[in-house]
Each structure stands twice: as C-alpha cells, then as structure tokens.
Amino acid sequence: MRLSRVKDLKPSGIRKFFDIVSEMKGAISLGVGEPDFITPWHIRNAAIRSVQRGYTQYTGNRGIPKLRDLISRYLFERFSVSYPADNVIVTVGASEGIDLVLRAICEVGDDILVPEPSY
C-alpha cells in the first residue's frame, strides 16, 4: 500500500477553525455538535439497556426502520407534514445530510450559490 499519498494529508479547514476558536476566551462553540452538558441518566440507561438486549450491530444505511417511522409520525404530529417512513433517512450528522442532498440534486458542472458565512 502506498502511504505517501496519505502522509501529507492536511487537516480540513473546519478543524483548523475549531482549533483557533477553542483558544478564544468567551467564544461559544457552535461546532461539531458536542454537547456542553453530561448525557442525562435516562438516555444513558436506555443505551445500556440496548446493549444488554444485543442491539450492537450496524444499522441499515437509511437508519433503523422503527426510528424512521417515529420520525415520520413526529413530523406529521408536530408540523402537519406527511412523509412516509420510506422517505426518511437518518444520517450521522448535518455534514452527511448536506452531502447526500447535494449529491442527489447536483450534477457535475452545475453552478451552486453558497451564501457566506456558511456552515
């Protein structure tokens, strides 16, 4: 395997920015989604129960079907919009969601307007 292509990889711009901001006094991080509080016990206990019940495998690429169904119901109950669970995808974060949307709607050579400042 050729490691020469990897050894000179530079950190992403966003990571450099996070490093700079982390040194700024009084700055509020709106970065990678790291909470500024300890995970509440009811969530920790639910995670422990899930592991004890054997829910330790990878999920499907679109997310856990029951979760997608619950999201679909939540959207209807909260916002009165109807999306079947088959049209719901659970991503690992905003970056993946944005990436998937852009890959779905953009073609090579398309012009894209990006407002600044941006995510």
Image (cartoon, rainbow, N blue to C red):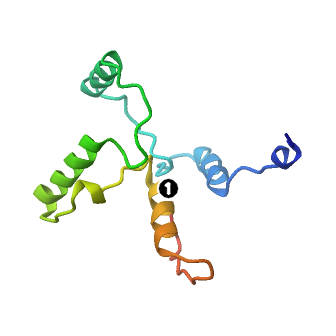
Residue occupying the far top of the picture = 52
Front-most of residues 84 and 77: 84
| Residue 30 percent location from the top left of the image | 46, 52
- Label 1 residue SS: helix
Q: Quadrant of residue 56?
A: top left
- Answer left or right for 107 relative to 67: right
* Image vertical order of residue 51 relative to residue 117, above or below: above
Residue receiving disc 1: 95
Q: Residue at position x 56%, y 46% from top?
A: 25
Q: Residue at position x 32%, y 41% from top?
A: 64
Q: Amino acid at mark 1?
A: Ser
* Image vertical order of residue 57 relative to residue 18, above or below: above
Of the 4 image quadrants, the one containing the N terminus is top right
| Residue 10 percent location from the top left of the image | 77, 51
Front-most of residues 40 and 9: 9
| Residue 115 percent location from the top left of the image | 50, 77
Residue count near mark 1 (Cα–Cα under 10 Å), binned few <14, some 14–19, many ≥20 = few
Q: Residue at position x 11%, y 56% from top?
A: 77
| Residue 117 percent location from the top left of the image | 52, 70
What is the total number of numbered labels drawn onto the structure image?
Answer: 1
Q: Residue at position x 17%, y 64% from top?
A: 82
Q: Quadrant of residue 87?
A: bottom left
